[in-house]
Image (cartoon, rainbow, N blue to C red):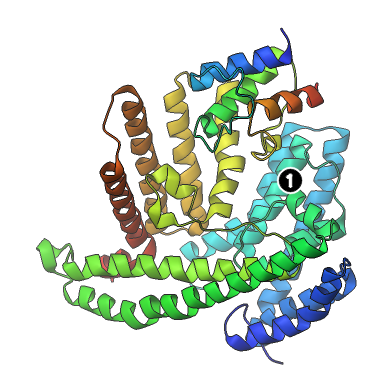
Amino acid sequence: MPNMQPYANPMYFMVLVIMLLPLMIALARGVRLKVYETIVSAAFIFLMFTGAKWQEGIALIAYCIWQVVIVLVYQRERQQHNRTGAFYAAVILAIAPLAIVKLTPVFSYHPSLLGFLGISYLTFKSVQVVMELRDGTIKAIRVWPFLRFLLFMPTISSGPIDRYRRFEKDYENVPDHNDYVDMVASGIHYMFLGFLYKFILGYFFGTVLLPQVAQAAMSQKMAMGGTGISWALVGYMYCYSMYLFFDFAGYSLFAVSISYLMGIRTPQNFNKPFLAGNIKDFWNRWHMSLSFWFRDFVFMRVTFYIMKHRLIKKRVHISQVAYLINFLIMGFWHGVTWYYIVYGLFHACAIIINDMWLRKKKKSHLPSNRWTKALAIGITFNVVCLSFLIFSGFLDTLWFH
Amino acid sequence: MDTQTVVLNILEDLTGEDLTGHLDTELFDSALLDSMDTVQLVLELEEQLDVQIPVSEFNRDDWKTPQQIIDQVEKLK
């Protein structure tokens, strides 16, 4: 049985586009071939988990059953009693499989049997559905629409993270002919931009350059009084940052591209992040579907809760606490290692300092021109690259291994 | 007080600008409102107009101008 990892090589794209052709021809004529789409999607998901990965496939099925049960049971509870405790229980149970998978490596050498490629991203979707059921913005949800949202094939492995109501609207409405033609044109454009990003630039920075800079940095392990801080390490920082961006932005473009071909406007993940003028702006441009999810379902909920119950008086302190909680959770979500958690704390501190600066700037009349803007972009870029050096885990290797 | 006056008063408190006559200003794109302001706006609307606005209802596409906020609140009343 062949195994095909999403967007891994040109073969994958060829087979996928050929299989999507009947769907695309029908969409151009105003019809969505739902059954055909389901079969093709299921086949491609199946091929992700063949061979040595069969256990992950079983884990995926078990995970889906688990989430469906939570959503259905919670939905009933919501309609009948709407108790706060039940809501928290549903959220905790929805996160539980991911939490177990992330915590297992801390206690054991073997990865958890519950894990599979994409579990992190699927969890965002199911937690979101539970929260919207609580809020009443999703009134009722049936098993089938929930599953097709959860398992939407182009984005199953690493996002972008869509929203249920947005997705459902796209799925139920076929774009009109001209819109769809435009979508296909954009889809093809994104695909080729993705090839450039992931297979050329990402490959160059990540596979060609990075191992060399890594070796150079490792050879100066004892530099600067044993801290290992060297020019090679600075080189590693920039090289890794470029690799991270082009690799992930390239992947995201593929996922958006294939979604567009399927007539679904999956949200974009990146908007020129390295041109951000401050850290706040950066999070509006980097891994957007994740940061907006955190903004809407963590940051805003936390601030709402604190303000409503008047737990903290000063508005500034509320936002600082909310930022810390927000970015700490994001750090833990990446994985339970010191460097992911420090990465989260680093960004929380950066955005808190950024906020202080913005308040100061509002009060005093500081110059604002193209030089100050260029300086702001330069500072932001370097702060972000430093955070990615932490994120890369290279310091862990450099210092502790 | 009618919805429009209340909404505009709250927005003036939050943004420091009187938006009467500028009902189609893009509040998020022009950086007049951020997430914190949004939460405060939702709380103030709930208190002063006795409506229930879930935070997740606050989809930035449907609530991005003063006029849209007024319309949405009217709908929820």
Res A98 → quadrant: bottom right
Residue A49 seen anywhere in this rendered image of the structure: no
Q: What residue type is disc 1 on?
A: Val
Q: Nearer the viewer, residue A297 or A372?
A: A372
Instruction: From this view, report whether residue A357 is shown above or below residue A337.
Output: above
Query: x%, y% of residue A310?
Result: 55, 19
- Subunit bearing disc 1: A
Query: x%, y% of residue A7?
Result: 60, 78
- Give the number of marks: 1
Give the residue displayed 14% in from the left and 64% down from the top. A226
**Residue A241 left/right relative to A147:** left
Instruction: From this view, report whether residue A3 is shown above or below residue A217.
Output: below
Mark 1 Cα shell of 10 Å, populated few (<14), some (14-19), many (≥20) = many
Question: Which secondary structure, mark 1?
Answer: helix
Query: x%, y% of residue B18?
Result: 54, 16
* Residue lying farthest to the bottom in this orientation: A1
**Residue A323 left/right relative to A118:** left
Residue of label 1: A130
Quadrant in which the C terminus of chain A appears: bottom left
Give the residue displayed 80% in from the left and 52% down from the top. A169
